[in-house]
Amino acid sequence: MLGIFIGIAAVVSLISLSDGLRGAITGQFGSLGSDKLTIQNAGTGFGPPGSTSVAKLNNHDIDIIEKVNGVNIVVPRLIRMVKVEYNDVVQFKYAGSIPDDKQQVKMVIDSMNIKMQEGMMLEAGETGKVVLGNDFTKTADFGKGLRENVKINIQGKDFRVKGIMQKQSSLITNGVIIMSEKDMKDILNISDETDLIVVQIKSGEDIEKVAADIKEAMRKDRNENIGEEDFSVQTPVQSLQAVDTILTIINIIIIGIASISLLVGGIGIANTMYTSVLERRKEIGVMKAIGARNSDILWIFLIEAGLLGLAGGIIGAVIGLGAAMLIAMVAKGFLGGVAFDVVISWPLLIFAVAFAFILGAISGVTPALQASKLRPVDALRS
Amino acid sequence: MEMVIKLEDVSKIYLMGDNEIKALNHADIIVNRGEFVAIMGPSGSGKSTAMNLTGSLDTPTKGKIFLGKHNIANLDESDLAQIRGKRIGFIFQSFNLIPNLTAKENVMLPMTFQGIDEDERERKAEELLKMIDLGDRMDHYPNQLSGGQQQRVAIARSLANDPEMILADEPTGNLDSKTGEMVMGFLKELNDNGRTIVMVTHDSKLAQEHAKKIYWLKDGRVEKVTVKKAGKWVLVK
């Protein structure tokens, strides 16, 4: 029975978790929505986008992209690490730029789901001010939490905090400094470069097609062969698919392990039933003497085996769900405001428990058959 | 006289390697309705075999067994089980109650196998248990009952399906003499009220005290048959 309960617990906790996990991970992508795609320098692994490639994205690329059919808004973004000083403490933090165009700023606010907790968001082209992610209000980094209106020194220049954003599910957003593109280029001495280009397509357009067209246009412009591009054009769908693939692999592995556990459990039940049949030989004989047919005996033992499985299944489902909730709680604690929620799926639980019952019954078939075939005179002699 | 069960020229032969063991050898046994028959003999006489065959718990190697008009010698186990459940009530030497069922549930069990619905089963079980003076112990488990009480529950159980015949295998074997007498008293009362009883025993005194017809077995054969006529034992065969 132990094997069954472990197997069921594993499957229930896994499936409950993995939906929550998917939600948490996709939450990191922000609400990019299905109408936006991103272009980055290729070779981007960890670290600021494009930090490891050669030909960086720039204004020329923006011109090329704007000319592609189906493109609506093109937003260049810089995301760089900057030196931040406050309260006599120096830290290195990420800063993200917003462009000087009003429409483009609106798109950034929408796609990052920016909501203010204190103060106000920057206007397009507003310099000398910054907006901070919610983590800046904590005391951990600078010994003192930052609030609206304080002065903060970035890369040697003073800025005033115009507002603080609400806590988000995206970890990156919670720790970012938002400033105007003009200021960022100024303090980092950047001229014609950009790290990220976010493109919003016209409504009704097929995003995969526009992405392909952009890729083709840029490839031609840079004179590169297919497959040798030093930039990447990513649609949200692709990112999600990547996540799904990873999750599916993890799921398969764990289900594989759980299956082994269930098999062991089934064997355990079969073993228990064999012993039970042996110990109750006389009882079986008596039951046959008082009129039980072979089929009656078979059912009695099959149901018993099924109930053993059912018990294991119920315990497993409860523990599996509990484990999933516990893990989610711990994960939430570690990851701050990440929305890692475990949803109780009743179909899953009912299926798991029913499966355990059936598995138990199947495991009990052979011993039950053996019991049913006992001759009363032999059984009574035990 | 209406016949309840008849073993006609019945033999049960076991093969142990090259040897033939004749547990029962050309036996003829007839039990008529309302009789109290004892099948008696020392151990090894074949009385257990005779009992198993009479109770349809086993099938003979040769011969016929008539339950009413039907020869049940060659029926398969499932058919025998149904017949058994309905027409024969068993009482065993070691009581053989199901340990994880209460007294009432034990008495209800034979009716379950006949497909009788729950309310009727409960009602009948309670009635039977009250009849043998165990109405106040209906929810006790066998391990909470004395030997005598367990045997009484077994008697109630054997009556559950209102069988044609009660088959008792050494019913007092595991009881002290006083309790044994009480149990035999119950059996006598059942017989006085018309129930057919077949008792298997090694105790000739017990047989002669309570039965009206005795089959004396020895080495697998029916040595003699005695019948009580007007208070005296008369040799019939």
Image (cartoon, coloured by chain):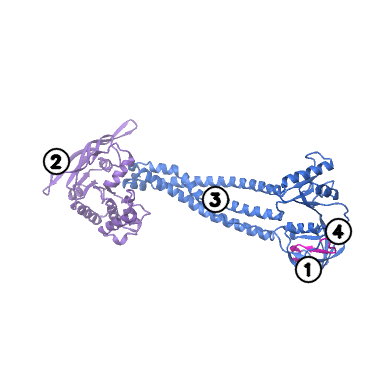
Residue denoted by label 1: A148
Q: Which mark is residue B236?
A: 2
Q: Is residue A300 above or below residue B131?
A: above
Q: Are marks 1 and 3 on the same chain?
A: yes
Chain designation of label 4: A
**In the picture provided, is A367 more to the left or to the right than B213?**
right
Q: Which mark is residue A19?
A: none
Per the model, the C-alpha gap separating discs 3 and 4 is 57 Å
Dot 1 or dot 3, earlier in sequence: 3
Query: Label 2 is placed on what type of residue?
Result: Val
Q: Nearer the viewer, mark 3 or mark 4?
A: 4
Q: Nearer the viewer, mark 1 or mark 2?
A: 1
Q: Nearer the viewer, mark 4 or mark 2?
A: 4
Q: Which mark is residue A8?
A: 3
Residue A64 horizontal/vertical position (percent): 83, 47
Number of numbered discs overlaid on the protein picture: 4
**In the picture provided, is A376 more to the left or to the right than A62?**
left
Confirm whether the magenta stretch covers residue A137: yes
Badge 2 density bin: few <14, some 14–19, many ≥20, Cα 10 Å: few
Q: Are marks 1 and 2 in contact (CB under 8 Å)?
A: no
Query: Label 1 is placed on what type of residue?
Result: Glu
Instruction: Tell which chain the image draws in purple.
Output: B
Instruction: Tell which chain the image draws in blue.
Output: A
Helix, strand or loop under label 2: loop
Q: Nearer the viewer, residue B105 or A278?
A: B105
Residue B147 horizontal/vertical position (percent): 30, 55
Helix, strand or loop under label 1: loop
Per the model, the C-alpha gap separating discs 1 and 3 is 51 Å
Query: Label 3 is placed on what type of residue?
Result: Ile
Chain designation of label 2: B
Q: Residue furthest top?
A: B18
Confirm whether the magenta stretch covers residue A22: no
